[in-house]
Image (spheres, rainbow, N blue to C red):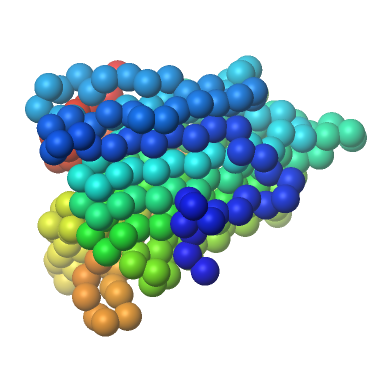
Amino acid sequence: MPYDLEKASFSPQIPVHGQVTVENHSNLKCAITEMWASNPLKMIQMKAKSLKSDAAWVFILNYGGGLLGGDAVGIRVEVGEKACMVLTAQASQKIYKQTPTHKGCNQEIICKIRNHGLLFVIPHPVTLFKDSSYVQDQHFELDKHASLLLVDWVTSGRISRGETWEMHLYRSINTVRVDNELLVWDTQKLDGGASLKTKMGPLHNVAMVVLVGPKLLDFAQGLVKREEEMRYSQQANTEVQDFGVRTSVSPLISRAGNSCGALVRVVAEQTMDVYEFLKKFLEPLEGLMGDNPYRE
């Protein structure tokens, strides 16, 4: 079933802690018409730095900078017709260790994007502390002519303290539906420990970027074309030389055979390399966003 905000139901254990709605008034300016949050969630409205963009910026924060064992947070987001929103954060989402009385933590986001609306979901990475458990579900329901850019990114932990992939569990599910058609269903499940550390080797960052919809289609098709050209010339993953990351790009195709966007996967050793890659990656879209969340 599609995730419609009017009928969306969160998991029974996940109450709604925040909601934000942005609308376009008379095709002139985007405005936040509803925004509220309750503990442990905070939402802060900001203006885009560029006057050329009318995007509404919302920062999602947690008291204490992260989620504790036992936290369960539900967030609803709606982008109205011809409206634009940037949903981001000020720092990484820290996932603290679970305790015997409070096992893991959960976060669920349900988003609805109306026709000609555009949503950027550009958080900083999830940082998994030792002995933590985190389950994340993000569901995006797009009208036929709506657009979405989603970044989903996790790091191995507090590397400076020697914690690498020592969480108990990390599971992230992202679904994207366009005009009731399921276009993306991506599940990532990592069980921490020695086996995972061996499999991951030197890699401490795993990220994904999803681009869907007409406002991002030219950009997405350019990424796919470049990937195909590099593969043809046997020079794939040349980004490694520039940013220290490895990438792959896959086209997103509807059941009717139409190009709908692209899915980019990123892995890297250094977190700062991913920041630099994503900052450069998003530069062509700064006119739509009004700024770059990864620009210092």
Residue at image position (89%, 35%) is: 100
228 or 84: nearer the viewer = 84
40 or 173: nearer the viewer = 40
Residue at image position (26%, 82%) is: 256
Residue at image position (30%, 75%) is: 254
Q: Quadrant of the C terminus?
A: top left
The percent position of residue 260, horizontal first and vertical second, equals: 25, 66
Say whether residue 190 is left or right of residue 54.
right
Residue at image position (77%, 35%) is: 70
Q: Is residue 115 at all visible to an observer of this figure?
A: yes
> Splitting the image into 4 quarters, where does residue 89 fall?
top left
The percent position of residue 11, horizontal first and vertical second, equals: 67, 52
> Splitting the image into 4 quarters, where does residue 242 fall?
top left
216 or 9: nearer the viewer = 9
Say whether residue 196 is left or right of residue 81.
right
Q: Residue furthest left?
A: 52
The percent position of residue 278, horizontal first and vertical second, equals: 30, 38
Q: Residue furthest front?
A: 26
Say whether residue 107 is left or right of residue 261.
right
Q: Is residue 227 above or below residue 100?
A: below
> Splitting the image into 4 quarters, where does residue 128 fall?
top right
Give the mark count.
0
Q: Is residue 183 at all visible to an observer of this figure?
A: no
